[in-house]
Image (spheres, rainbow, N blue to C red):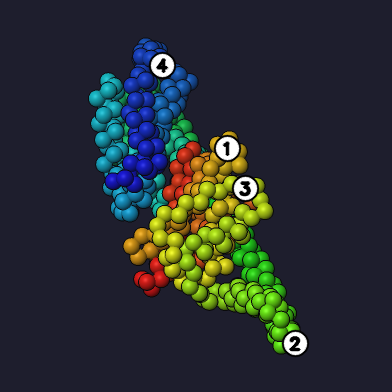
Amino acid sequence: MGRVIKSRKIWIGIGLFLLGILIPFWLKPQLIGLDQLLQTMNQKTDGSALMFNAFLIVSINTIVSIPQFLSVVMLGDGMAEALNCPRFKTIIPLTAVPLAYIIVNQLTPLNYSFGATDIFLWISIVVMQALSKQKLNMGMKLLVFSQLIFGVAWLNQVPFLTPYGFGQGSLSIKIKQVAIQIGFGQVLTLYANVLFFIFVASAITLWIYLILYMERWAISQDLLRAKLEANESRSGREVLHLVHDLKTPLATIEGLVSLMETRWPDPKMQEYCQTIYGSITSMSKMVSEILYEDRKNWCELKELIDYIRASRLSGTNLSVDIELDGEPQSNLYINKIRLTRAIINLIDNALDAIQDQENGRVVLRAKTLENSVELEVEDNGNGISENDVKRIWKTGYSTKNHPGFGLAFVRQVAEGHEGYVNIKSEVGQGTKVWITLPLGESQ
């Protein structure tokens, strides 16, 4: 239920639905002068007045229909996503559109019928929705459906289609009756059919163009991500070769220290040599963790936090609050280098989010639970929109002005440690990202 309440599409759909109900109330014939035009047409009829009135009625029907049909599309999509039930994309429009017409007819003296035109429109929109595979955004749908609705609405003005359920509304029937009386029935039919084909063809052409454009854009984004992944892979290989080459000087240093330890038995020199041995051992472990992703070692939680602090914040004027909630001696079986890189990535993102904030704050928080530990980075920056939250896990996607590897790498590291990563963000409030890892005793 919470996802339904938070869905922006559902709220937009509800707003459009209410707008579609209120528009006919605002566009009453008395308010726009249509009553007077119809009375004048009864007394003195001519072709130009007839065509003008037909155009005005089609425009009114289009203005009434656009928010109604767009609302059911948004409501159907929003409910289907929130409840993970694709059937709502069909169920909601089938019930909401007739309901809107019933309410409209209660608010106005005009008879807005739900007939063949509306059924034809809905089938067309459902088919276009299915074939477009949700590639079009709200603005694109508005452009396409507006032209489609305006074109299809002209079928209501074709006299010979009346027995088949087209143009059953009081205004459309009035126009067609007058056209037949003054001998303009065929002209109105021709006029309506031409406009129908022009606007429907334009809508279909625009729809195809926008789909192809979005497909090309998606392909370009895929190519960009592939290029970024290739660059990351190449950079990673170069780093691995460089790190691998560190083993040779380390071995040389270790041999020389062993020789020094043998040649100079002085106690102070022996102490120095042991210190150097310890540093060489630590460096060897770091090299192994960089070279082999699955190479892990036991590490206390406090040791990890201290290492992150030293790696990211040492020598800088950046302020990150660190909170350790729980047992500092909790053991983690981790690749300390890769996990540190992941946390630093989160810290960098948080610092970017607050760089324009006067009272910006970033917190690195470690919490121990019963069988797991949470490493959390929280900021009070601008936050991330719901749409961006769904896409930030893709390699190459970034909310900044440049592409990055970001959260895709963080998720990879978390899953490589049998953990997972979550995010909670609200526009204007801030963002919280946390990695959950199993404690040593639970592995």
Decide if residue 408 is on the left or right side of residue 234. left
Residue, x 42% and y 29% (percent of image)? 63
Label 1: which residue?
Answer: 357
Question: Upstream in the sequence, badge 1 or badge 3?
Answer: 3
| Above or below for 116 versus 37 | below
Residue contact at pointers 4 and 2, CB within 8 angstroms: no
Amino acid of disc 1: Gln
Label 3: which residue?
Answer: 318
Tell me, yes or no, if residue 51 can be seen here: yes
| Residue 252 position in % (x across, y down) | 73, 83
Label 2: which residue?
Answer: 263
Question: Upstream in the sequence, badge 1 or badge 4?
Answer: 4
Question: Upstream in the sequence, badge 3 or badge 4?
Answer: 4
| Residue 111 position in % (x across, y down) | 28, 26
In depth, the one of 250 and 125 nearer the eye is: 250
Amino acid of disc 4: Ile
Residue, x 41% and y 31% (percent of image)? 62
For mark 3, give the secondary structure.
Answer: loop
Amino acid of disc 3: Leu
Question: Upstream in the sequence, badge 1 or badge 2?
Answer: 2
Amino acid of disc 2: Arg
| Residue 140 position in % (x across, y down) | 50, 42
Question: Upstream in the sequence, badge 4 or badge 2?
Answer: 4
Label 4: which residue?
Answer: 32
Question: Upstream in the sequence, badge 2 or badge 3?
Answer: 2
In depth, the one of 287 and 166 nearer the eye is: 287
Q: Which mark is residue 305?
A: none
